[in-house]
Image (tube, rainbow, N blue to C red):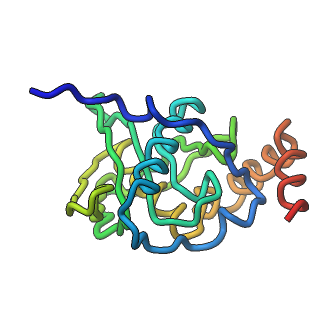
């Protein structure tokens, strides 16, 4: 078996976009060029995700408005799921809805009980254009839904209502990174 490289080892971490950055609220564009630039983007996304200690990362979280995400996420049985999807589409989100803890690299340190389906299926392609279907349950299903939301211009806080939403947004406004997020937003 030929040796495989570990995803992200040739990438470089990029700065994360934080709550308030317009890059996080716009739907991402389809990838049309499956070239070395896309491969570099995916490597940089892995490196960024690992540096930030996340389990998933969408391209717009580093300011690239393309439909790409990477993941290295366990499911509820502690099985590791590692990969990436280009031009992903959430084709199924079903099963029971559970309110579970959810955070985001674009809202560091903020978690809230967020309702998500327990099963998800996402279709897309690899960095080389090969078709892929990824199925997840439990925590991994949550991750898949979360990353697809990002690519559609959404955040997990968009799924929160009432007191949970107010608490999460209040915590974000008071977070040490909030001034940096405002500076990024006003610098555009």
Looking at the image, residue 102 lies above or below residue 122: above
Residue sitting farthest toward the left: 1
Q: Quadrant of the N terminus?
A: top left
Identity of the residue drawn at 22% across and 59% down: 133
Identity of the residue drawn at 29% across and 32% down: 80
Indicate the position of residue 115 as horizontal and vertical percent values.
Answer: 49, 55
Indicate the position of residue 38 as horizontal and vertical percent values.
Answer: 43, 56
Q: Of residues 61 and 178, which is closer to you in this image? A: 61
Q: Of residues 84 and 80, which is closer to you in this image? A: 84
Identity of the residue drawn at 70% across and 56% down: 165
Looking at the image, residue 92 lies above or below residue 140: below
Looking at the image, residue 36 lies above or below residue 102: below
User: Quick check: can you spot residue 109?
Assistant: yes
Indicate the position of residue 95 as horizontal and vertical percent values.
Answer: 28, 59
Indicate the position of residue 174 as horizontal and vertical percent values.
Answer: 87, 42
Residue 21 occupies which quadrant of the picture? bottom right
């Amino acid at each position: 078996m030929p040796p495989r490289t570990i995803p992200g080892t040739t990438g470089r971490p990029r700065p994360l976009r934080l709550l308030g950055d317009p890059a996080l609220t716009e739907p991402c564009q389809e990838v049309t060029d499956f070239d070395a630039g896309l491969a570099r983007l995916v490597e940089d996304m892995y490196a960024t995700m690992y540096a930030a200690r996340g389990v998933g990362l969408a391209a717009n979280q580093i300011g690239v408005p393309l439909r790409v995400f990477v993941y290295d996420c366990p499911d509820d049985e502690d099985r590791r799921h590692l990969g990436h999807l280009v031009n992903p589409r959430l084709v199924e989100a079903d099963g029971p809805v559970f309110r579970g803890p959810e955070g985001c690299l674009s809202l560091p340190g903020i978690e809230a009980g967020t309702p998500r389906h327990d099963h998800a299926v996402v279709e897309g392609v690899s960095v080389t254009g090969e078709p892929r279907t990824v199925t997840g349950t439990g925590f991994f299903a949550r991750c898949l839904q979360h990353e697809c939301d990002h690519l559609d211009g959404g955040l997990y806080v968009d799924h929160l209502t009432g007191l949970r939403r107010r608490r999460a947004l209040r915590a974000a406004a008071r977070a040490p990174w909030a001034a940096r997020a405002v500076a990024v937003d006003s610098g555009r």
